[in-house]
Image (spheres, rainbow, N blue to C red):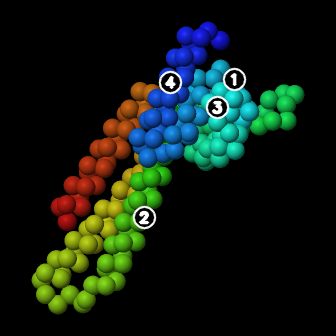
Amino acid sequence: MDSKLAELQDSFIEIAGQMSSSLGLNRVVGQLYGLLFLSKEPLSLDQMSDRLKMSKGNISVNIRELEKWGAVRKVWTKGSRKDFYEADLDTFKIIINQLTIGLKRRLSEVLVSLEGIEECLPNPGGSEATLFKDRLMKAKEMSRRIEGLLTVGKSIFSANADQPSQKLQAFRKVGKRLVETINNIQEK
């Protein structure tokens, strides 16, 4: 490989690691994805370890995380008993999947917290307690609707995975439905 090209690839891989780190993820996860994203052929754990100058164990742990996300997949390579991996090049899909998973997890945590607050509420005796309970119900309803929209949005994006312009249209549809949902909740 041309030394200038190798230097540029190293820069790209480092940027992928920095971006991953800035999003609160492991830097190595980003570097591995960057390496596989640029690779014209699947790579083994040994090859990734050699290229990134990291232990095979570290590579193995982080490649499994990427597999869980659907960002990389294990592929069979004729004549070898080693595991080889290649990147899913649809970064938009990967990002949408991870955002959906993260938001759903956070919304679930919010719902559990809101239900805990609701359980501690005394019987509404005054207008202030009644108002609090009504607002709490609205917050729970909004969380449930947003969670539903995330599910719908993810399926829309998945259905249009091969067409970038359709992805943008799907994104607009989800955004429009989210605004409509929020407006409906505020009107109640």
Q: Nearer the viewer, mark 3 or mark 2?
A: 3
Instruction: Say the numbered circle drawn on residue 108.
Output: 2
Q: Is residue 161 above or below residue 4?
A: below
- How far apart in space, not on screen, are marks 3 and 2 (Cα)? 39 Å
| Residue 159 in view of the camera | no
| Residue placed under numbered mark 3 in the picture | 53
| Residue placed under numbered mark 1 in the picture | 41
Say which quadrant the N terminus sits in. Answer: top right
- How far apart in space, not on screen, are marks 3 and 4 (Cα)? 16 Å
Residue 143 coordinates in the image, percent (x, y):
34, 62
Instruction: Say the numbered circle drawn on residue 12.
Output: 4
Say which quadrant the C terminus sits in. Answer: bottom left
**Lower position in the chain sequence, tag 3 or tag 4:** 4
Residue 96 coordinates in the image, percent (x, y):
45, 42
- How far apart in space, not on screen, are marks 4 and 2 (Cα)? 36 Å
**Lower position in the chain sequence, tag 3 or tag 2:** 3
Q: Nearer the viewer, residue 13 or 39?
A: 13
Residue occupying the point 72% across, 35% down:
45
**80 on left or right of 64:** right
**140 on left or right of 83:** left
| Pointers 3 and 4 in contact (C-beta within 8 Å) | no
**Lower position in the chain sequence, tag 2 or tag 1:** 1
Quarter of the image where one finds residue 121: bottom left
Q: Secondary structure at mark 1?
A: loop
